[in-house]
Amino acid sequence: MAFGRLSRGPDAAPLSEINVTPLVDVMLVLVVVFLLTAPLLATSIRLDLPQAAAAPAPAAKAALQLVVDAAGQAFVEDKPLDDQALSARLLRIAADDPDTEVQLRADTAVPYGRVVALLGLAQQAGLAHVGFVALPQPPAAARP
């Protein structure tokens, strides 16, 4: 078995090109990470949900997430709706499936009157199943 060596003559110049393959690999990984995390950051509505010590509710067959932020703005599917548009949307949903559950996610700073007004819109549309979403209460030892 003969081992040879590449001969370098006096006219052979060193290879002076940059290897871009590792750079491209790192950039593709970063693009994938940003593509996965960007929708999570852009569509979330900041809420401070109340805490309650209750058993988790069973999953509803059909559910509508109604979110109310601290300013009292109502959101359905992360889209802000005024009361008229919300009422029309609730009427359409009730016409399709009157057993749809409205899952209300209201910030702790939302006035009680605003929550009652939204519940009235749901009741007028014919949606009688309402669930209040809250965070689970931490164990007694972990409370501050």
Image: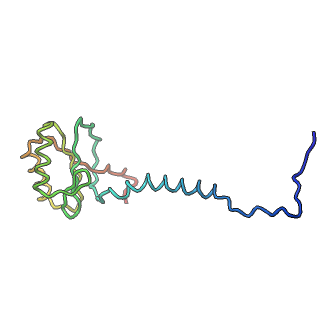
Find residue 62 and report its horizontal and vertical position in percent: 22, 37
Q: Which residue lies furthest to the right in this view?
A: 2
Say which residue appears at 17% left-offset and 44% top-offset.
130
Along the line of sight, the residue nearer the viewer: 43 or 46:
43
Say which residue appears at 20% left-offset and 44% top-offset.
131
Along the line of sight, the residue nearer the viewer: 121 or 137:
121
Find residue 27 and report its horizontal and vertical position in percent: 55, 57
Looking at the image, residue 20 sits to the left or right of residue 73; the answer is right
Looking at the image, residue 1 sits to the left or right of residue 111; the answer is right
User: How is the protein colored in the picture?
Assistant: rainbow
Looking at the image, residue 84 sits to the left or right of residue 10; the answer is left
Image quadrant occupied by the N terminus: top right
Find residue 30 and report its horizontal and vertical position in percent: 52, 56
Along the line of sight, the residue nearer the viewer: 52 or 37:
37
Image quadrant occupied by the C terminus: bottom left
Find residue 28 and report its horizontal and vertical position in percent: 54, 54
Say which residue appears at 58% left-offset and 56% top-offset.
26
Q: Residue furthest front?
A: 11
Q: Residue furthest left?
A: 124
Along the line of sight, the residue nearer the viewer: 31 or 83:
31
